[in-house]
Amino acid sequence: KGPKGMLSQKVNKDITISQEDGTLHVTRPSDSKPHRAMHGLYRALVNNMVTGVTTGFTKVLVLEGVGYRASVAGSQLTLNVGYSHPVVFDAPETISYETPAPNRILVKGIDKQQVGAIAADIRATRKPEPYLGKGIRYENEKIRRKEGKTGKK
């Protein structure tokens, strides 16, 4: 629980999580490879849950292309990205959309996995293409550009 909400996670029966003096401790029964892997997984999941309920997570998407724009009405995100119809995304109760500019989308929430999955779904509607760079990309994503046709010699 935190100021932004509450999250829960099912944990494997071999891994134990205990709270001592305000800190969470993740322990494993042995040093075998599966137990070490689960130990790291659940430590990271617990860390993401603590970060999510205290500060939250944000993914920034950028729309590049002539006429590409996004708008938010209530809990719906509407994208105009070159199709004959607008693409509409409904937000789950733990996710919110913001559009500080017509070509920027902020996906905010407390669950890191859900924020990333929804941002990936939005990006999948029009992936950035390598020739002109048009499409929806993450804010700090580098798109490898191709040269294109060179013409006859």
Image: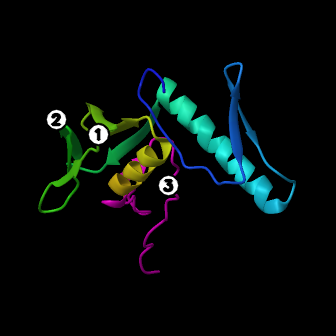
The residue identified by callout 3 is 143
Give amino acid for label 3. Answer: Ile
Q: Main secondary structure of the magenta part?
A: loop
Q: Residue at x 86, y 53 (%)?
A: 30
Q: Residue at x 29, y 51 (%)?
A: 65
The residue identified by callout 1 is 93
Q: First in sequence: mark 3 or mark 1?
A: 1
Residue 138 belongs to magenta span: yes
Give the extent of the magenta segment.
Answer: 124-153
Q: Judge whether 80 appears above or below 76 on screen.
A: below
Image coordinates of residue 103 in percent, x first then y, are 29, 40
Mark 1 is surrounded, within 10 Å at the Cα level, by few (under 14), some (14 to 19) or many (20 or more) other residues, namely few
In the displayed structure image, the side of residue 48 where residue 116 appears, left or right: left
Residue 83 belongs to magenta span: no
Q: First in sequence: mark 2 or mark 1?
A: 2
| 49, 142: nearer the viewer | 49
